[in-house]
Amino acid sequence: MGSLFDAKTKIESIIVERKLERSLTLGKIGLKAGFMLAFVKQDTPDDAEKLNKLRLAAQEVLGTTI
């Protein structure tokens, strides 16, 4: 698994733990990051720029660092 997929998995875990609306929360993060998280799979190649954008978006929406 790559770092991008690991970050997505962590985000999904936080959403479940906090009992947030999954599709709404992932949508907000995806809009802020500039790509849809549904397209991030285990074999998705790592991209440092996407990973950074995803971390910043998650921090803004979830209020936590991943």
Image (cartoon, helix red, strand yellow):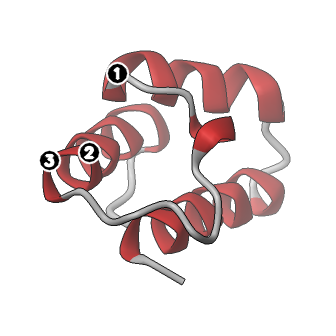
Packing grade of label 2 (10 A; few <14, some 14-19, many >=20) is some
Secondary structure at numbered mark 3: helix
Give percent across and percent down for residue 28. Answer: 53, 19
Secondary structure at numbered mark 2: helix
Give percent across and percent down for residue 66. Answer: 38, 66
Secondary structure at numbered mark 1: loop
Please give the name of the residue rendered at 16% of the width and 59% of the height, measured from the top-left corner. Answer: 48
Q: In which quadrant will I find the N terminus?
A: bottom right
Of residue 20 and residue 1, the one placed in the foreground of this image is 1
Q: What label sits on residue 34 in the rendered view?
A: 1
Does the residue at mark 3 contact the one at mark 2 (Cβ under 8 Å)?
yes
Q: What label sits on residue 55 in the rendered view?
A: none
Q: How many labels does the image show?
A: 3
Q: Residue furthest bottom?
A: 1
Please give the name of the residue rendered at 50% of the width and 60% of the height, measured from the top-left corner. Answer: 44
| Amino acid of disc 3 | Glu
Packing grade of label 1 (10 A; few <14, some 14-19, many >=20) is few
Give percent across and percent down for residue 38. Answer: 68, 38
Residue ID for mark 3: 49
Residue ID for mark 2: 50
Of residue 21 and residue 40, the one placed in the foreground of this image is 40
Does the residue at mark 2 contact the one at mark 1 (Cβ under 8 Å)?
yes
Q: Which of marks 1 and 3 is nearer the N terminus?
A: 1
Of residue 47 and residue 66, the one placed in the foreground of this image is 47
